[in-house]
Amino acid sequence: MSVVPEINVIKKDWRKVDLKVALCYPNVYRAGMSGLTVKLLYALINAREDIACERFFIPTGRESLRSLESNQPLRKFDVVAFTLQYEEDYPNVIRMLIESGIPPRRNDRREDDPLIIAGGPCATGNPEPLADYIDLFVIGEAEPVIYSILDEIKSFGCCRSRVEELADIRGVYLPDVSERAERVWIRNLDEALHPLAQQIPLVDDDSPYMPIFGKTFTLEVVRGCDRGCRFCLIGHTCRPKRDRSLEKLKSIIDEGLEYTPVNKVTLIGASLFAYKHLEDLCEYIVSRGLELSVSSLSPESITDRLAELIRLGGQRTVSIAPDAANAEMWRVIGKGMSEESILHAAETLLEHGIKQLKMYFLVGLPGETMEDIISIARLSRRIADLGYGLRSIHLSINPLIPKPHTPFERLGLSPISHLRECLRIIRRELRGDGRFTISMLDPRHAQIQALLSLGDRRVGSAIELAAKYGGGLGAWRRAIRECKIDLEEYIEGRRDGPLPWNKIKISP
Ligand code: SF4
């Protein structure tokens, strides 16, 4: 029996399928099942009667690393498919392989070991750090390419030595074979499959298996973003922005809730704020007596009507991402925003009874001065003065981690001392003000993220060692030292020369 009881689990008779795919999320169940990716890939692959797809997560408790559906180990599958959403999960990829008795390096694998494939935003941005460990990367979105890949694998009987035959499929990157790989994406979101029967854990609210948004139907409204903020990976590797029509979304909700009996709908999509029917969609959900959850919004999208609908839908906290706090820094990061629009949005939310705000800011931006950091505190205080109460505004401060394919790809990560100083200044400016809680990603973790984001193939051996040593900061320090990786070389920025992700063609 599975460690976590769920509805809508798909269990197939292995004797009746031609191919078995292990879908791996390299983190715990709660993290993997809070988004749509796992549910979407699971539905997409299982839509094929000849293929069985089962899920794997990093164990939450003492359970063993086995599939949720049939309790089988990873090595019993023909294909092991990882979705790479966050670079910090890379050691977990290697850990899952090692713990399953699969040689982590692709050149050490035997003919009868599963084929290891990986996709997701991190794989698309820069596959090189894991290139010695993954047989095949999917560059871009899964829908246009996944069946072609699985059909080919099926046709050659999962024979490892024939994997090179996949090199001609657009969207495939084979390390050591592909000279170049082109990103693929779906043109029309209305025609794309949306999971209707979603997996919901039958656990208590305080269970470690409960997803972040609770028992909810996750609805992908838009995909990609056209805004092009200069730091944003999604804004540069997931273009163009595509919408689902309002009619389509309504029918997905109607049908989806028949299969997924929950009373909450969570809207997702990088540029959800730009969806032109957002209010009508929220109205539809609320009018059906459902709860509503909306991910990060832009200030200008927060109207009276939307704020009221969010309140009626039971959402108590709204997230916005100003990322900077003055005109010059907004110009630097290419984010069209103004203080007035943020204040107006915060006031509108408050007037409609939404009393909790989460705001994201970046520090370590190019050309940043301490005055710019002070302006983050100043803007936050002006917002709080609109009438926000005790512990009602959470400031999430994040170091700028340069990302591949963005205009900041050759920048470096700010020194740890500077990042700590930024946090110290914000805390100092807001000291004694009980309306705020403040958090910041540990700059040492930011260094590891930058290494994995900007790294090349040499970084792989450090990932492997970090996985063997447990994956924490101490493990990383030891791994970097033993692999003789010059961390500074990677994270201080590259003025010129080729970049590790040059083989990946992202356009348009
Ligand atoms: S930061 Fe947000 S608005 Fe800007 S490009 Fe990325 S997803 Fe779009």
Image: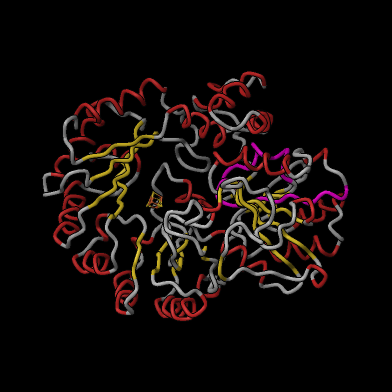
Which image quadrant is residue 132 in? top right
What residue lies at 40% left-to-right and 68% top-to-bottom?
Answer: 265
Q: Is residue 219 in sight in this rendering?
A: no
Asked whether residue 124 is drawn in magenta, I would say yes
Q: Is residue 336 left or right of residue 409?
A: left
- The residue lying toward the viewer, choosing from 47 and 451, is 47
Q: Which percent across, then down, holds residue 24?
A: 64, 52
Front-most of residues 204 and 406:
204
Residue drawn at (23%, 45%), measured in percent from left and top?
A: 393
Image point 21% across, 64% down: which residue?
Answer: 303
Q: The N terminus appears in which quarter of the rendering?
A: bottom right
Where does residue 167 sit, x and y in percent of width and height?
76, 53
Question: What residue is shown at x 45% (from left), y 72% (from top)?
Answer: 244
The color scheme shown is: secondary structure
Count of numbered circles on the image: 0
154 part of magenta stretch: no
Tell me: residue 334, above or below residue 463. Answer: below
Left or right, residue 480 beside residue 108: left
Q: Look at the picture and state if 454 lies above or below 318.
A: above
Q: Quadrant of residue 468?
A: top right
Please give left or right for residue 310 compared with residue 150 in the image. left
Query: Where in the figure is residue 99, as x and y percent of width and height?
Result: 72, 41
Q: What stretch of residues is rendered in magenta?
A: 111-134
Would residue 21 be seen by someone viewing this image from the given angle?
Answer: yes
Q: Position of residue 262 (x, y in %)?
A: 43, 72
Vertical placement of residue 125 versus 354, above or below: above
Looking at the image, residue 105 lies above or below residue 42: above
